Amino acid sequence: MKYSEDLHELIHSMSKNEKRYFILNSSLQKGNKIYLQLFKAVEKQKIYDEKHIKDKYINEKFIKNYAINKNYLYSLLMKSLVHYNSPKSVDGQIHSLISECSIFFRKALYKKYFRCYIV
Protein backbone atom coordinates (compact mmCIF):
# COMPACT_ATOMS: atom_id res chain seq x y z
CA MET A 1 0.00 0.00 0.00
CA LYS A 2 1.27 3.46 -0.85
CA TYR A 3 1.60 6.09 1.85
CA SER A 4 -0.84 8.26 -0.14
CA GLU A 5 -3.57 5.69 0.39
CA ASP A 6 -3.25 5.90 4.18
CA LEU A 7 -5.39 9.03 4.35
CA HIS A 8 -8.13 7.39 2.28
CA GLU A 9 -8.04 4.26 4.39
CA LEU A 10 -8.16 6.27 7.63
CA ILE A 11 -11.14 8.34 6.50
CA HIS A 12 -13.08 5.29 5.36
CA SER A 13 -12.34 3.45 8.62
CA MET A 14 -13.95 6.23 10.66
CA SER A 15 -17.46 5.81 11.99
CA LYS A 16 -20.17 8.31 11.18
CA ASN A 17 -19.88 9.76 14.69
CA GLU A 18 -16.10 10.11 14.43
CA LYS A 19 -16.45 11.98 11.14
CA ARG A 20 -19.12 14.22 12.62
CA TYR A 21 -16.91 14.91 15.65
CA PHE A 22 -14.00 15.84 13.37
CA ILE A 23 -16.11 18.20 11.26
CA LEU A 24 -17.69 19.87 14.31
CA ASN A 25 -14.29 20.31 15.97
CA SER A 26 -12.89 21.78 12.77
CA SER A 27 -15.74 24.26 12.53
CA LEU A 28 -14.71 25.69 15.90
CA GLN A 29 -11.33 26.73 14.47
CA LYS A 30 -10.91 30.17 12.95
CA GLY A 31 -9.54 30.80 9.50
CA ASN A 32 -9.72 29.03 6.19
CA LYS A 33 -10.28 25.31 6.54
CA ILE A 34 -9.15 24.03 3.17
CA TYR A 35 -8.35 20.66 4.71
CA LEU A 36 -12.12 20.09 5.09
CA GLN A 37 -12.49 20.33 1.31
CA LEU A 38 -9.82 17.68 0.94
CA PHE A 39 -11.52 15.55 3.60
CA LYS A 40 -14.82 15.66 1.71
CA ALA A 41 -13.13 14.96 -1.63
CA VAL A 42 -11.33 11.88 -0.31
CA GLU A 43 -14.41 10.72 1.57
CA LYS A 44 -16.43 10.66 -1.66
CA GLN A 45 -14.04 8.24 -3.36
CA LYS A 46 -14.62 4.52 -2.98
CA ILE A 47 -11.15 3.76 -4.37
CA TYR A 48 -8.40 6.30 -3.83
CA ASP A 49 -7.39 8.08 -7.02
CA GLU A 50 -5.12 11.05 -6.39
CA LYS A 51 -4.95 11.99 -10.06
CA HIS A 52 -8.75 12.18 -10.24
CA ILE A 53 -8.85 14.47 -7.19
CA LYS A 54 -6.19 16.75 -8.66
CA ASP A 55 -8.01 16.91 -12.00
CA LYS A 56 -11.50 17.41 -10.55
CA TYR A 57 -10.51 20.04 -7.98
CA ILE A 58 -7.82 21.78 -10.03
CA ASN A 59 -9.03 25.27 -9.04
CA GLU A 60 -9.36 24.55 -5.32
CA LYS A 61 -6.83 25.93 -2.84
CA PHE A 62 -5.98 22.55 -1.30
CA ILE A 63 -4.52 21.30 -4.61
CA LYS A 64 -1.80 23.96 -4.67
CA ASN A 65 0.05 22.31 -1.76
CA TYR A 66 -1.60 18.93 -1.97
CA ALA A 67 1.04 16.89 -0.15
CA ILE A 68 1.25 19.37 2.72
CA ASN A 69 -2.53 19.60 3.05
CA LYS A 70 -2.85 15.82 2.92
CA ASN A 71 -0.29 15.37 5.73
CA TYR A 72 -1.92 18.14 7.77
CA LEU A 73 -5.35 16.54 7.37
CA TYR A 74 -3.97 13.14 8.39
CA SER A 75 -2.43 14.67 11.51
CA LEU A 76 -5.67 16.46 12.43
CA LEU A 77 -7.69 13.29 11.91
CA MET A 78 -5.41 11.32 14.21
CA LYS A 79 -5.61 13.99 16.91
CA SER A 80 -9.38 14.07 16.58
CA LEU A 81 -9.65 10.29 16.82
CA VAL A 82 -7.41 10.18 19.89
CA HIS A 83 -9.46 12.90 21.56
CA TYR A 84 -12.77 11.28 20.58
CA ASN A 85 -11.80 7.84 21.84
CA SER A 86 -9.78 8.76 24.94
CA PRO A 87 -12.69 8.89 27.44
CA LYS A 88 -13.66 5.38 26.37
CA SER A 89 -10.38 3.74 27.35
CA VAL A 90 -8.55 3.40 30.64
CA ASP A 91 -5.31 4.42 28.92
CA GLY A 92 -6.97 7.62 27.69
CA GLN A 93 -8.31 8.46 31.13
CA ILE A 94 -4.91 7.90 32.74
CA HIS A 95 -3.18 10.00 30.09
CA SER A 96 -5.72 12.78 30.63
CA LEU A 97 -5.20 12.74 34.39
CA ILE A 98 -1.41 12.86 33.98
CA SER A 99 -1.74 15.76 31.53
CA GLU A 100 -3.98 17.69 33.92
CA CYS A 101 -1.56 17.18 36.80
CA SER A 102 1.36 18.26 34.64
CA ILE A 103 -0.46 21.49 33.73
CA PHE A 104 -1.19 22.22 37.40
CA PHE A 105 2.48 21.68 38.27
CA ARG A 106 3.79 23.91 35.46
CA LYS A 107 1.38 26.67 36.49
CA ALA A 108 2.48 26.31 40.14
CA LEU A 109 -1.03 25.32 41.24
CA TYR A 110 0.39 22.89 43.77
CA LYS A 111 -2.78 22.35 45.83
CA LYS A 112 -4.59 21.13 42.75
CA TYR A 113 -1.52 19.20 41.62
CA PHE A 114 -1.34 17.19 44.84
CA ARG A 115 -5.10 16.62 44.77
CA CYS A 116 -4.64 14.90 41.39
CA TYR A 117 -2.58 12.15 42.95
CA ILE A 118 -4.88 11.68 45.94
CA VAL A 119 -7.90 10.83 43.76
Image (cartoon, grey):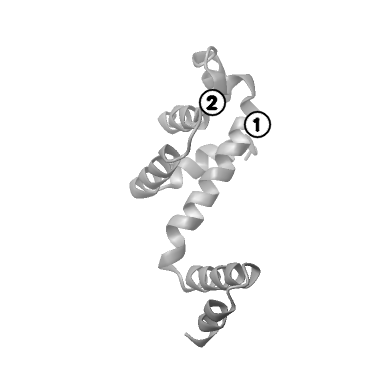
- Residue 31: image x %, image y %? 50, 30
Q: Residues within 10 Å of mark 2 (few under 14, many from 20)?
A: few
Residue assigned mark 2: 49
Q: Which residue is mark 1?
A: 68
- Three-letter code for the amino acid on which mark 1 is drawn: Ile
| Residue pictured at 52% horizontal, 19% vertical | 52
Most foreground residue, 67 or 50: 67
Graded by Cα atoms within 10 Å as few (under 14), some (14 to 19) or many (20 or more), the crowding at tag 1 reads few
Looking at the rendered structure, the secondary structure element under dot 2 is loop
Q: Earlier in the sequence, mark 2 or mark 1?
A: 2
Among the 4 quarters of the image, the one containing residue 43: top left
> Can you say whether 11 is above or below 59 in the image?
below
The circle drawn on residue 100 is none
Q: Quadrant of the N terminus?
A: top right
Q: Secondary structure at mark 1?
A: helix
Residue 106 pos. (x, y %): 65, 68
Q: Nearer the viewer, residue 109 or 49?
A: 109
Question: The disc labelled 2 sits on which kind of residue?
Answer: Asp
Mark pair 2, 1: CA separation: 17 Å
In the rendered view, would you say 57 is above or below 108?
above
Residue 56: x percent and y percent? 49, 15
Percent x, y of residue 35: 52, 31
